[in-house]
Image (spheres, helix red, strand yellow):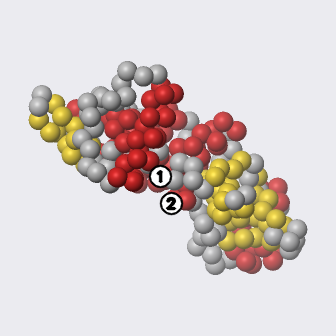
Amino acid sequence: MDEPFAAVDPITREHLQDMFLRLQRKIQKTIVFVTHDIDEAIKMGDKIAILKEGQVIQYATPKDLLANPRNDFVESFVGSDRALKILNLFQVEELMLADPIHLDLDQDDSSVKDQLKNTTDNTVFVVKDHGELTGWITASRARQAANIRDAINPLAGSVDITATVKEAVAEMLQNGIDAVRVLEDGKTRGMMTMAYIRNYVEDICGVIGKTKDIQKAGI
């Protein structure tokens, strides 16, 4: 298939891509899909071959291609925002914090801090009123806070469990928040935090500190 969707508008192109992927899941046939659009290649391909002057420069999964471009040509081809492209490859279900500690704010501060004394889990859900989730806090901050209730971060936003990690980042950036709850059928299943996503991107890209990609995203 030689650039089959190149001559259509972006909205139609996205619909055709989604239709193609649904069909491919049913027919399970190997298809060679030619495109000059790296975003399309990442979305459509199980494996991607980057060619230059008739030679295969790198052949890899989208994840490996973005995380470990073989040379400067491949790195420039996939784009300077490759860290953001990686976030589009995962659903929040794969990376969310699914079972953090739950702090009951109906207790007094000393009881809450006793609960955190020996925990190694740094992200903590805050609940009150018979288990209603109201926010989150890091365990280290809760142990140091003079008043835990004043140090709580609200969970103002949410994403569906089928959303991509990139969509979770967009939700946080658009609303100026550092975390979102992850919902399935309207019920909280977990949480995504900006710090966790940043650390994941740094690990998978093999970088130390903030990359240019992350700075551009405002993370």
Relative image position of residue 23 (x, y in whole percent): 40, 47
Residue toward you, 199 or 92? 92
Residue highlighted by disc 1: 90
Kindly identify the amino acid type of the residue bearing the numbered disc 1.
Phe
Say if mark 2 contacts mark 1, CB within 8 Å.
Answer: yes
- The residue that appears at 60% across and 66% down in the rendered structure is 98
Estimate the x, y position of residue 138 in percent, counting from the top left: 66, 61
- State the residue position of label 2: 94
The amino acid on which the numbered mark 2 sits, given as a three-letter code, is Glu
Is residue 121 toward the left or the right of residue 60 in the image? right
Looking at the rendered structure, the secondary structure element under dot 1 is: loop
* Residue 29 shown left or right of residue 125 in the figure: left
The reply, left or right, for residue 8 in relation to residue 195 is left
Among the 4 quarters of the image, the one containing residue 39:
top left
Q: Is residue 203 above or below residue 52?
A: below
Estimate the x, y position of residue 143 in percent, counting from the top left.
Answer: 71, 67
Residue 127, image quadrant? bottom right
How far is mark 2 from mark 1, CA to CA?
A: 7 Å
Q: Position of residue 90 (x, y in %)?
A: 47, 52
> Element at badge 2?
helix
Quadrant (top left, top right, bottom left, bottom right) of the N terminus? top left
Judge whether residue 117 can be spotted in this image.
yes
Give me the residue at 12% from left, 28% from top: 53
